[in-house]
Structures are given as C-alpha cells and as structure tokens.
Amino acid sequence: MQADFNRPVLAVDTGTSYLSLALRADGETRLFHQEAGSRQSEWILPQIRTLFHDAGITAANLGAIVYAKGPGAFTGLRIGIGVAQGLATPFDTPLIGIPTLDAAASLPPPQSCILAAADARMGEVFYAWFDTLNRRRLSDYQVGRAADIRLPEGCAFSDGIGNAFALENRPPFSGKPDMPTAADFLNLAAEGGFPAVAAAHAELLYVRNKIALTAKEQAERRARP
C-alpha cells in the first residue's frame, strides 16, 4: 500500500501512560499530548474527533494513519492499534507502524551511536542502539536490566534518550529522559523507511515474549541484584 502524505495524516501513540495524538492537515500539525493513565481508552476517540473537527476533516480524508507499534505498555499498545485499525478499515487507509525506540532515537541531533531506552516495568528496560547519522539500527530490540546494557562493538561512547533515564536504576550512560510525541512519530513516518500496510496486517512489537508474569515472577525480577 502507498501512504499519501499530501492528504491529512493522523498519528497515535498509546504505548506509555500518555495519550499522544497528532493530526497534520493543510500544512498544520495539531497535537494532543497528555498524561492519561488508565483513561486512554476513554479519551482517545473523543480527542480524535476534536482533532478532526478542528481541521474540518473526517476519517475518510486520511491519507495514512501512523501508530506506535512498541515496545511499550501492552494494554496501551492494543488500544492504539485497535483504534487505528477501526478508523482505517472502512476506507482502506494505509497504516504505518513506527517502533517506539526508533522514534525516541530520532529526537537528538543525528549521531553515530545512541541508546534509546524505555521503562519496561518489573525492573527492566526496553532498549536498542542506533546510528542515526546513517539511519541504521545497530542492535536488536531488547529487554533487560539497565545495569546490564553494554556498548555495541564499534561504539566508543554513547548518549542516551528515553524515559528509562528517569528511573532510579537507569542505564549506565549519560542521557535525557525525553520521549517522542505523536508528532515525532508522524515526522519519522513522513521521512519514509517504514512500510505502509493494510489494517488487517498491522502488527505490534512486544519484545518481551511473555506478556503477563505471575506475582512471584515479578517479585523475583525486582529482587535480582
């Protein structure tokens, strides 16, 4: 499928505790970005309707829908992709999934080695290494303890980005705790490099193979030295 960025494009990010929505139409980007906690599912459709109303469009006018595909909060990610698919399916609107860590890595100025790391709960972080000068990912998407993260081969030093750097047990590198907004996902999608697919083929990136852990398993992870 082919996305049409000459038409309005909606971006949805529900992979953190924030509800982040961006709509680009007629050269203007409207952004809703607010801490939502457990109210993402309650707020998302009314806020999208408000964005559409303010821009004078409907879902039928969209040339693409961009969504955060993770890794991130399981329930939040499912809310986001579900809404994106629901809006896209009646009009065969293309969906573009952007990995959350790629969007985070795009925030600082381009550099040859940067660590994007996000809170994965249970004492762990999601992370990946990037060379944003050459638009390359240097590692797989991974999950583990922040203290165990090591520089990849060929990197002498690194800066970091992502909300993992706001944690008490943060990665052992300098970094800023910034996370992308839906507008950043939209910008990255517009640059190309991420495929547009039909709604039925949209996928999420979980990284963690086992989504739900027992209380005992969670306690064991938190107790690791």
Image (tube, rainbow, N blue to C red):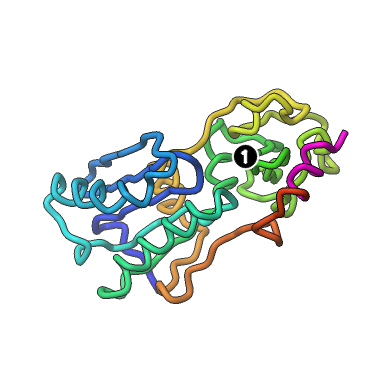
**In which quarter of the view is residue 67 placed?**
bottom left
Left or right of 50, for residue 129: right
Tell me which residue sits at (72%, 41%) in the image.
124
Relative image position of residue 194 (x, y in whole percent) = 51, 60
Q: Is residue 150 visible?
A: no
Q: Nearer the viewer, residue 25 or 213?
A: 213
Q: Quadrant of the N terminus?
A: bottom left
Left or right of 188, for residue 212: right
Relative image position of residue 178 (x, y in whole percent) = 53, 30
Residue extent of the magenta highlight: 217-225
Relative image position of residue 112 (x, y in whole percent) = 69, 37
Task: Name the amino acid, label 1.
Answer: Ala
Q: Is residue 69 magenta?
A: no
Q: Nearer the viewer, residue 56 or 124?
A: 124
Disc 1 element: strand
Tell me which residue sits at (60%, 25%) in the image.
176
**In which quarter of the view is residue 113 placed?**
top right
- Which residue, as the protein is rendered here, is positioned at the far right? 225
Residue at the spot of label 1? 118
